[in-house]
Image: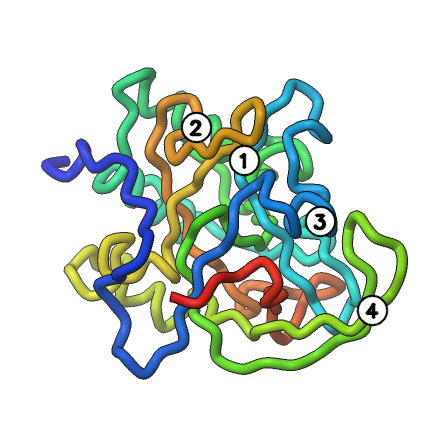
Amino acid sequence: MADRKVTGIIHRGSVPAPPPAVELYQVMAWGDPIPSDEYGLNTANVRGGSNFQVFPLFVPGTGTWSAIANHVYLGRDEMDYMIQLQQRFGNWDNGTFNSLMNWLVKDGEGTRPYWGGKWESDKAFEYGTMLWGRQVVEIVGEATFKTTTPRNDKSRNIRMGKVRMFTRADFEIAKQFGEQITPITHPHLIPQCAGAGKGNKFNPTPKGYTMFSPLWGPEWGRGATAVEAYYAPFEYLVKI
């Protein structure tokens, strides 16, 4: 609980980890020209004028950008980790811990980043895999796909980077809550959940909450939503 006061640690420029050989990029923000024009990431397109600062990832196997269609499945162990992650690194001075968790997790498909049950007691949850505005991302390969974008129905060739996701091996280390894998050391694996306010104002603390979420990867997929990899278009990434 000593770390509860951590706020606004969205990284710009220098990043503490991983090793120098890794290819690091930063995601743009809502309202930037390409995210707005090609991906519809503009609060003018959202009822109420604000939203989580989420960026879609492309899945070649399904040919879609939908976080809901390409979601992963989590269990009680993962949700217990999420609770402890917020308790250690989050901040809820403008509300309560319960209200913070209720903002992240809600029953009802796609209404929050996590859905499918009560975070306090249920055993099964779903998560819409996506990136967050201004987060750091590690790219481990690249490919070009001919596809449409969420805001443009005309197919074109788009160069994309394969995103290094949070793995089960990472999870086994991270849930011990040592200093090896944390939002501070590995913001590319456990990014901060930012928001987009009215007029596309970047908000690292939606509702006044500092929240974090791993990039749960393909190992948590199954059935129709199982995917091999997630890709981010270079056109909404900036090299660090």
Q: Residue furthest left?
A: 2
Disc number for residue 115: none
Give the CA separation, mark 4 to mark 2: 34 Å
Q: Are marks 1 and 2 in contact (CB under 8 Å)?
A: yes
The residue that label 1 is drawn on is 52
Image location (x, y in percent) of residue 166:
43, 65
Q: CA distance from mark 3 to mark 2?
A: 21 Å
Residue type at numbered disc 1: Phe
**Disc 4 marks which residue?**
156
Quadrant where the C terminus sits is bottom left
Which residue is found at the position 20% from the left and 55% from the top?
Answer: 177
Q: Is residue 93 left or right of residue 3?
A: right
Which mark, residue 39? Answer: 3
Q: Secondary structure at mark 4?
A: strand
Q: Which residue is denoted by mark 2 in the rendering?
A: 206
Q: How far apart in space, not on screen, are marks 3 and 4 (Cα)?
A: 14 Å
Q: Secondary structure at mark 2?
A: helix
